Amino acid sequence: MSVFTSSPAAGGPIIDFAASESSLEIAGLSIAYGEKSALRDLTLRIPRHRVTAFIGPSGCGKSTLLRALNRLHDLNEEVVRRGEVRLEGQDIHAPQVDVAELRRRVGMVFQAPNPFPMSIYDNVAFGLRLQGGMRKRQIDDTVEWALQSAALWEEVKDRLRASAWTLSGGQQQRLVIARTLAVQPEVLLLDEPASALDPISTLKIEELIRNLKSRLSLVLVTHNMQQAARVSDYTAFLQRGELVEYGPTQTLFTNPRLRRTENYITGRMT
Amino acid sequence: MNDPRPHLSLRLRRRRVRDRLATLLITAGGVGVVVSVLAIGVFLALEVVPLFLGEDALNARELWHPQPVEGYAEPQHRWRPEPLVEGDTTHFGMAPLVWGTLKAALWALLFAVPLALGAAMHSALYMPRRLRARLKPTLELMEALPGVVIGFVAGMLLAPWVERHLAAALLLLVALPFGALLAGGLRALLPVPLQQRLPLGWAGLWLAPWLLLVGGATLWLGPALEAALVGGDLRGWLADTLGLDYAARNAMIVGLAMGFAVIPGIYALAEDALVGVPDSLGEGAQALGATRWQTLCKVVLPAAAPGIFSAMMIGAGRAVGETMIVLMASGNTALMSLNPMEGLRSLSATIAIELPEAAVGGTHYRLLFLAALVLFAFTFLVNTLAEGVRTRLRHRYRRLEGGA
Amino acid sequence: MRTLWHRRGEGPWPWLAAGSVALSLLMLLALLLLLSVRGLGHFWPDEVALVMPQDGQPFAGVAVREERIPGGEARERLYFTGNHDLDGDRWRWVEVSAIAAIRHPAELVVLERSRWGQFLGRLVAVVGDGERHSGEAAWPALQARLAELDALRDERDRLRDDVVVPLVRRLENSGSLGDAESRAALAAAQARIRELQSAMGGDTLILESVDGRRIAQPLDLVLRAWRPNAMTPPQKLMAWSEGVWRFLSEGPRAANSAGGVWPAIFGTVLMVLLMSLVVTPFGVLAGIYLNEVAHQGPLTRLVRIGVRNLAGVPSIVYGVFGLGVFVYGIGGTLDEWFFSDRLPSPTFGTGGLLWASLTLALLTLPVVIVATEEGLARVPDHQREGALALGATRMEMLTRVVLPMTLPAMLTGMILAVARAAGEVAPLMLVGVAKLAPQVPVDGDFPFLHLERKFMHLGYHIYDAAFHGDDVQAAMPLVFATALLLVLVILVLNLTAIFLRHHLRARHGAPRW
């Protein structure tokens, strides 16, 4: 097994983990919205139990990439895809794959908190009830476990029956994370999870992200480079739908190999 | 963790099947409903076809051109689908019905369009937002009033009243707009503090009692004026001098009643079009020193013109198809005259009166289906046109707002 | 545009625009006021005037309105005089200046009769069972007898509706002679009815019109009696509310020109209920299909525009469609298959409750579809994605997240559909409304709900009573009351819908974080 995924482009991925350690593998992925190309021939691997961040200017395709990882693009009929995404070695677009089950295994948290208009408890239990086959007692336990994992339990344990919309923005976002954790995904996709939040809530979310990597693999999309530097282990820089540079966060931020990356990181170009 | 689970669990498979089934059901139901709704036009057309094909097909000329009628030298347009007495000939001239329909709709629009557009301009431009938010649902309620009630009031109360007070009623048509203008003029003469108690934005409300006063004065003056100008009997004068007959239930009454019914529809769409014009456009003109009214005429109205046009089209569609009002307020006489003070008979009223008695499958029956088909096609086309215009307008506004 | 304030005058034209708002509101207000005053005023026991013309006989009447005589300053007044059996007319115009005196004697009575309409005049005596109450004693005696009569009538009606009619129908259906038990029960009931009838008859009122003509009035034809001039305001109020109640709860009399509108209320409500049972599921289904399932291509857009435009197609066209497809098409076929023994008299092959409901359902389908679609479009996409991201299938996403949020919108659509349907009359004239159908379509007979029967409708009742009666003038007050009722029902429904929609907007529009 090669340690490096060879890529002809200078500045291609420098990866210091073995292929067997990757959770998701993306191979030659291109995505277009109708005529408009959003991602071009992307190849990279995302490590297990690490935080991988995607950074890049807005419109670079990082959110598009994230949505490709749990097939949310299926909703949009305009989207055209080429290439493969493999979760633990299995092609997620294979015909026998059940999309619902895939999405359970690859959870996602969105930019704006989107709790359902129901109680806090029901929000967390939502995914569990879809799976079915659980007793009330089990659900109760899992809800508590998920809320604790999302560091929300202490704040809401006395008002589990209150509407989720009564929570603050930061709490709502942690609720959404708890809701996702409850169905025990293997990968958690985070699409700018803190962009709508105040600084203190942002810190809480970032701490949560760091704590969660012992349990699952996290993929974080952010336009906030400090955030990427603070929480991620690996960082990929995307520009105009192409992967520019990918490597350990430390290396990428302190010693980028390409001028384009450096310009972006130092803020000389947005 | 890294077990890819090649076989789906039973539960998962059941959920999948349920999803497929439900999707199938919704698709079948949805397509079924949509198709059956859209089938209306097809069905009407199929029922009409035997009129023009087959052995005893009608000549299309018979429908739209004057036919010789017993007792008349000239060929006449005549609608008499069933013989009145044994041996009477039948006439299938549909021209008077179409004429009556259009005449009623035209008078309705003549009455409704100025009022609805005026109201839309006032509420879009001058009214405070909160007042406007109240006015819209009020006028929506006006639209919800059933035609049978409006028709009843028009046919049983308004028609006899206008017949007795024709001069005063006609005078009202002039006096009310004049009264509104007069109010504006008088207000300008008031001291400024008083003027501010009567803001233009609220004029829609405080003008109402004033107009009531003007109306009352007009009714009081009416007979005197009638006596002075035409010798006290306007109807007699009209008949003698201009040769105009007067029927109590006539096109004007229908226009008034149906106008009342279509005002809210036109108002709502026209107001949407006016409010939808991006503020940046009007503010540009006002920054150059134009008054709000000038801004309206020069900038906002042209920008919203397609929307206003489509509002009028939809109003026309409603007026053409309205049944109960015409049935109750028009007298239902199949005439072809220009005189607004004579009765008329519309397609819709004809269907309502005659179809229950027409023999199934007969020529008369099929002709009434033809009438329904004409109504259907007309309103459907008019609405589609209006909808298309509105959609394009919305796109344009979005572009303008995006560019601003 | 709203933000700038101009000191400069705006010119005359804005006043015309403002005037049109004022005029529109004024017209709406005038119409509602007219309906309320005329509709509710009818039940108020008006004073009866004893009018003495300068020449000719005195008469008793209720002043209705005044008009200027064309071509002069003189005015004339219309009185409702009743006494159709004496005068051959119920109305009388009198020139105001020709009236010598008007008085309001307390002893004038008004009788509501089931034949000949109202009587206005004096009560001379009550004669019956060999007794004769006259003078002061006559009025209390009449009141007492009327109360007894009411009780007897009630018993008779109950017996007829609950015992006789079902029995007769059962005997008819069982073909031959039926079982002996039923026949015995029927005979007993009929005997009791005859007994009641004879108990009602026999008494006579001696009445005198104010100009001195006497008549003998069989008491069993008198429904109510009152002396408006002797009533105090609270008594009048009582009589008024009683009148309103009668109007709402009784059936029509005298060719729809008197009595109440209960069967019409019942018919309208039942028809609208059936319609909403049909239109809601199908409309919602089609809305969900168009917005959530269908491929969002040009075809769907076209279909959507088509459906929207159907809302603008005249209602009479739907009536024609209903007549052609439901009544003659499906109904005719049903008759051939299942009811051929009753042909040529049609069962389902003629207008009826079912066909009317279906036609109106078709008519209001676009309303429900559009409302559902708007509700669905207002659910933010991130809610859908949130559900999907948790591993929900599309159906689970719809049923657990999206549809609960759309519920108020669907409800609004349904209410608007009901409001529209309640006011539609034109299509009903083709597919099943009846001028007079005293039998409501629900009764104790199997299958309890008679979908093939014709029914009465408030809107059609207005049209029929106002245009097809013999004495339209006499029917007018009732028509006004009916119109007011219909308008009230529709306004309440619409207000509910407006309130719901507003509530909905406020909930979805409010910032949530």
Image (spheres, coloured by chain):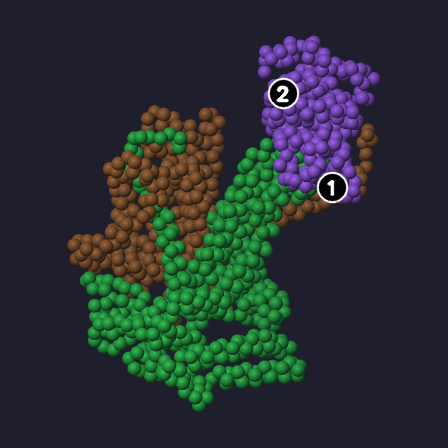
Which quadrant of the structure image shows residue C278?
bottom right
Q: Secondary structure at mark 1?
A: helix
Rendered position, B277 above or below B254: above
Query: Where is residue C304 shown, x and y percent of the image?
Result: 54, 43
Q: Can you tell which chain is drawn brown?
A: B
Kind of residue at disc 2: His
Q: Residue at x 40, y 51 (%)?
A: B261
Task: Name the quadrant of the C terminus of chain C.
Answer: top right
Rendered position, C390 above or below A86: below
Which quadrant of the structure image shows residue C244?
bottom left
Query: Where is residue B304 shown, x and y percent of the image?
Result: 40, 35
- Report in which chain the residue with disc 2 lies: A
Query: Where is residue C392 shown, x and y percent of the image?
Result: 70, 38
Q: Which residue is mark 1?
A: A129
- C177 vs C480, left or right, is right
- B199 vs B7, left or right, is left
Q: Colour of chain A?
A: purple
Closest to the observer, A232 or A248 = A232
Res. A223 mark: 2
Q: Can you tell which chain is drawn green?
A: C
